[in-house]
Image (spheres, grey):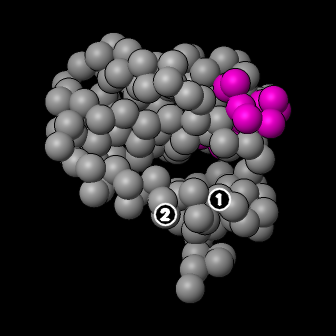
Amino acid sequence: MKFDMEAREKRQAILELAQLMWEHGYVEDLQGLVDATMAREAEYSTGIGMGVGIPHAKSPLVKQPVVAFGKSSKGIEFDSFDGEPVYLVFLIAVPEKSDKEHLNILSMLSRALMHEEVREALMGASTPEEVVNAFQINDD
């Protein structure tokens, strides 16, 4: 998790979060993951609006499914559907053959982030525990 991202544009944001994955041993090749994620972004932007970006990639360079979270107080240009900057970024990386995990993670994040209360709690979070608690706000 990165609570004060320095990135101001999409590629930098993806690199910052991919770096966390690489440092913790989830990814074999940092630049390869960034390139795979940017190739996916070229198909269509994962800036879903409401200040949220969920870039994701499937790659043989990823050892196991992982999600990295980052937030920005300044905003990141992300080519979002609503044209607004992104403040919350979730980078999802899964091994090449992980269709089910990939879709489950994406679905869970998307559902939770539709709730304004969850997004507000994430913007106010400064610890991993607060991030986890934010996702329990509207947990059924």
Quarter of the image with the C terminus in it? bottom right
Instruction: Out of 73 and 112, give the one closest to the viewer.
Output: 112
Question: At 35% from the left edge and 21% from the top edge, which residue is drawn?
Answer: 36
Question: At 50% from the left edge and 24% from the top edge, which residue is drawn?
Answer: 43
Q: Where in the figure is residue 84, as x and y percent of width and height?
A: 82, 32
Residue type at mark 2 is: Met
Question: Which residue range is magenta in the image?
Answer: 78-89
- Residue for badge 1: 113
Residue type at mark 1 is: Leu
User: For the residue labelled by badge 2, is the local secondary structure a helix, a strand or a loop?
Assistant: helix
In this rendering, is residue 50 above or below 72?
A: below
Instruction: Out of 119 and 128, give the one closest to the viewer.
Output: 119
Tell me: 14 left or right of 124: left
Q: Where in the figure is residue 126, as x and y percent of width and height?
A: 65, 52
Tell me: 12 left or right of 100: right
Q: Is residue 131 visible?
A: no
Farthest residue, direction front: 43
Label 2: few (<14), some (14–19) or many (≥20) C-alpha neighbours in 10 Å: few
Chief SS of the magenta region: loop
Membership of 79 in magenta stretch: yes
Membership of 1 in magenta stretch: no
Residue 104 image-quadrant placement: bottom left
Question: At 49% from the left edge and 63% from the top edge, which residue is drawn?
Answer: 108
Residue 112 image-quadrant placement: bottom right
In this rendering, is residue 107 above or below 41?
A: below
Farthest residue, direction bottom: 140
Label 1: few (<14), some (14–19) or many (≥20) C-alpha neighbours in 10 Å: many
If you read the primary sequence from the N terminus, does the residue marked by circle 2 or circle 1 appear first? 2
Question: At 55% from the left edge and 41% from the top edge, which residue is drawn?
Answer: 54
- Residue for badge 2: 108
